[in-house]
Amino acid sequence: MTGALAFASAQTISFDRTTFDYGNVKAGADGHRFFTVKNTGDKPLIISEVKPSCGCTTPEWSKDPILPGKTAQIKVGYNTGIKGAFNKLIEVYSNDPANNRSVLYIKGNVEDVAAGSNTMAQEANLTVAPVATAKAVPATAKRTVKKEVRKVEAAK
């Protein structure tokens, strides 16, 4: 019975969301996003570690205890210099006895700025004229055309 009582009066971690969808972002854009952490228990919550799944993701968080009913933020930075789709996980370790390891996710797509300019032109309904290419005309064809021109001129 004592264990159940101690468990009921503990620190409890909760998040405003567990997945942050960046959507489409431009290469080199600000890759920082925030998760809000709330202590819904009645004892101080301590986040001991925030561990990203790879070096392309950098977390920042306060080591200060989160008091009961209060919130804090975990700042997550993704390297938007890496083009293409991404889906990364971030492990959050705390002193919540029921949930000492929580998992957050970030996902999205980093667009190449140069490739995006063609898309923007298409969205704006801009017409791009095709570039003409010159073809080499064989010398025999040139002579034939000249002969035909002389015949037409002589007939006039």
Image: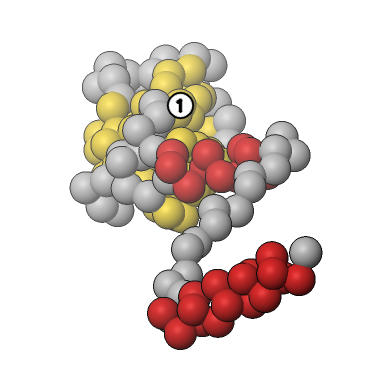
- Residue at the image point whose x is 39% and y is 26% from the top: 30
Q: Quadrant of residue 113?
A: top left
The one nearer the camera, 3 or 10, is 10
Q: Quadrant of residue 151?
A: bottom right
- Residue at the image point whose x is 62% and y is 71% from the top: 150
Q: Which residue is mark 1?
A: 34
Residue 37 seen in this snapshot: no
Image quadrant holding the C terminus, namely bottom right
Number of other residues with Cα within 10 Å of mark 1, as a class: few under 14, some 14 to 19, many 20 or more: some
Q: Quadrant of residue 11?
A: top left
Question: From the viewer's perspective, is residue 30 above or below residue 53?
Answer: above
The one nearer the camera, 51 or 20, is 20
Rendering coords of residue 25 (x, y %): 49, 37
Q: How many marks?
A: 1
- Residue at the image point whose x is 49% and y is 75% from the top: 142
Rendering coords of residue 100 (x, y %): 37, 45
Rendering coords of residue 62 (x, y %): 29, 20
Residue 84 seen in this snapshot: yes
Rendering coords of residue 145 (x, y %): 58, 75
Badge 1 amino acid: Phe
Q: Residue furthest left?
A: 55
Q: Residue furthest bottom?
A: 140
Decide if residue 16 is on the left or right side of residue 35. right
**What colouring does the structure picture have?**
secondary structure
Question: From the viewer's perspective, is residue 25 above or below residue 133?
Answer: above
Q: Helix, strand or loop at disc 1?
A: strand
